[in-house]
Image (cartoon, rainbow, N blue to C red):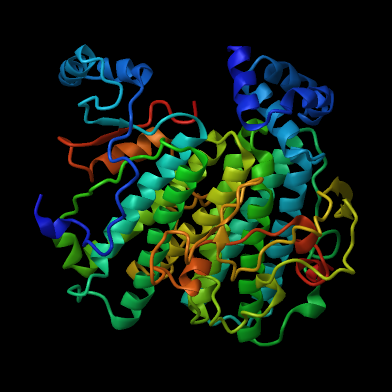
Amino acid sequence: MNLFNIIEHLAEVDSDVLGRFDSRRAVFNSLGSVAKRAALATSPLFLGALFQKAYAGTTSTPIDVLNYALTLELLEADFYRQFIAARQIPSGADDTAIRLIKSHEDAHVTALTAAIRALSGTPVAGTATTGIRFNASLLPASYADQLKLAQLLEDTGVRAYKGRAAELLGAPNDLLTVALQIHSVEARHAAHIRSMRNQLPWPNAADDVATDTTYTGGVPNTSTTSTVVTLGGTTYGIPAYERTKPSMAESNINQGAIGTKAALPITTAFGDTPPKYSADDAAAAFDEALQPAEVLDASRAGRLLA
Amino acid sequence: MPDTLRPTDSESPRPAQSLHTPIKRRSFFMYAGATAGVTALALAGCSKESETTAPSINVSLGFGDASVLNYAYALEQLEAAFYAKAVAATTTVLSTAEKAVLTNVATHEAIHRDFLQAAINRDFPGQLLQTLTFKFDDATFTDRTRLLTAAKTFEDLGVAAYNGAGKLFKVPAYVSIAGQIVSVEARHAAYVRDLLTSGSFAAIDQVDATTGLDKQMAPADVIKIVNTYLDATVVQLDVSTIGQ
């Protein structure tokens, strides 16, 4: 491994990176067990993680990110448990699909719990009666409304994973890939439930729930500013809510802003007159992320927690 | 290749800033060792001390984040070219409703292609992968099952490719941008799969039943498949330096 090459890479994208090297001890501490640290210290992955951590400027650890993901998976898994137990689902294709989706959410809970333990962290937990679970009083009575809630939960899940996956760049155990592999499954679920409801597979202005907070940006100004969440038997950190940079609504058509580089307006960026792409297509071609504080806010998934 | 296999003019990407990606001497020698035939071509170019027009069919995706973005750009070019043909006016194997949705899908892929092209030109001037011309079997577009099977293949391939490529980026912001695209690909994949076989949106051939994880593929394995849709005598993509 050529250290000079790496530093050269760092300097290419961040000229201040050398000044951030004093945070290496904190990064080191976030990387898990003693044995893993020893292994990581001798691998390029370690320096990669050091860089990503320094660059991202976040104090969240991979365990924090995984616990956040596990919170949402526990909520989804328990929602589907109650959805099935309510016995409103028509037998046949609908029943098969909902049970398949629940089996994936259960598998995600198992996978994330194991991943957190592998990093010597304490996973959040939940059962039907304790810890992180779906608020039973919010389960709608009708199948149509239950299915609608399933769509809102899946589309929220997609936005939530998207909001934090980048923090796992350079994390051990290929956790970024695992998070992406869960993220795309949530998108498949969302698309199928949308089809079951005769909606297009992606968020769009013609949705019957287009104005739901699931698809809007930001959160009310009264929302929490806490960077620590205590749920399901443990405490984990989330990044402070960036009020000046609220997440985009799903109707956003400006993509690709990085640092000081402005976003590309999809309808007009490609120099075509008249514009080659409609605003509807521009919005639908990209799903939008949500910050964790937005997801856990009472206006979104936060209200569904028991 | 028959003209009918080419994307129509109105749907094809605008020519890239440079149709021939400049090949630096460093990559040049890398290719020289690849095959005997290519070596001969490469040496011919070498004797002229050419820095820009090595007559090699191997086209490198480049280095660093530019290479990962070029990888995505190649995949989006493939998908956009396929769907442009699939929803062309003469196609009658889809129902009106299906065609309407797949026309949306075709537009999403064209947007992804044009967006990535613009983003690479903005962030990595001069490193954009060339515009690619793909060949598809004509029979694919006259049979519903074959058409949807091809669509499923491309969408699932795209999802697995993005899932496997995220870790290759150096700058986290690009992971976020790729994430905004891959979930739309997964939505497409689920929709097309359901059209082909109802309820197969996340079937076990794609989503592992035990782990609940979608597929992920390494760039070399993905490009091996993409290359089969390129004219092997003209262009073959080389991912050997991706992410480096």
Relative height, residue B125 to residue B155 (above, below): above
At 11% from the left edge and 56% from the top edge, which residue is drawn? B3
- The foreground one among A270 and B13 is A270
Image location (x, y in percent) of residue B212: 56, 52
Image location (x, y in percent) of residue B115: 46, 54
Q: How many badges with numbers are in the image?
A: 0
- The foreground one among B102 and A137 is B102
- The foreground one among B240 and A117 is B240
- The foreground one among B3 and A184 is B3
At 61% from the left edge and 73% from the top edge, which residue is drawn? A151
At 58% from the left edge and 44% from the top edge, which residue is drawn? B175
Furthest-bottom residue in this view: A142
Left or right of residue A163: residue A188: left
Left or right of residue A101: residue B74: left
* Occupied quadrant, residue B203: bottom left
Relative height, residue A235 to residue B124 (above, below): below
* Occupied quadrant, residue B57: top left
Q: Is residue A91 visible?
A: no
Relative height, residue A124 to residue A192 (above, below): above
Please identify the quadrant where the N terminus of chain A is shown. top right
Image location (x, y in percent) of residue B216: 47, 43
Image location (x, y in percent) of residue B187: 48, 63
Left or right of residue A66: residue B154: left
Q: Is residue A40 visible?
A: yes
Please identify the quadrant where the C terminus of chain A is shown. bottom right
Left or right of residue A290: residue B230: left
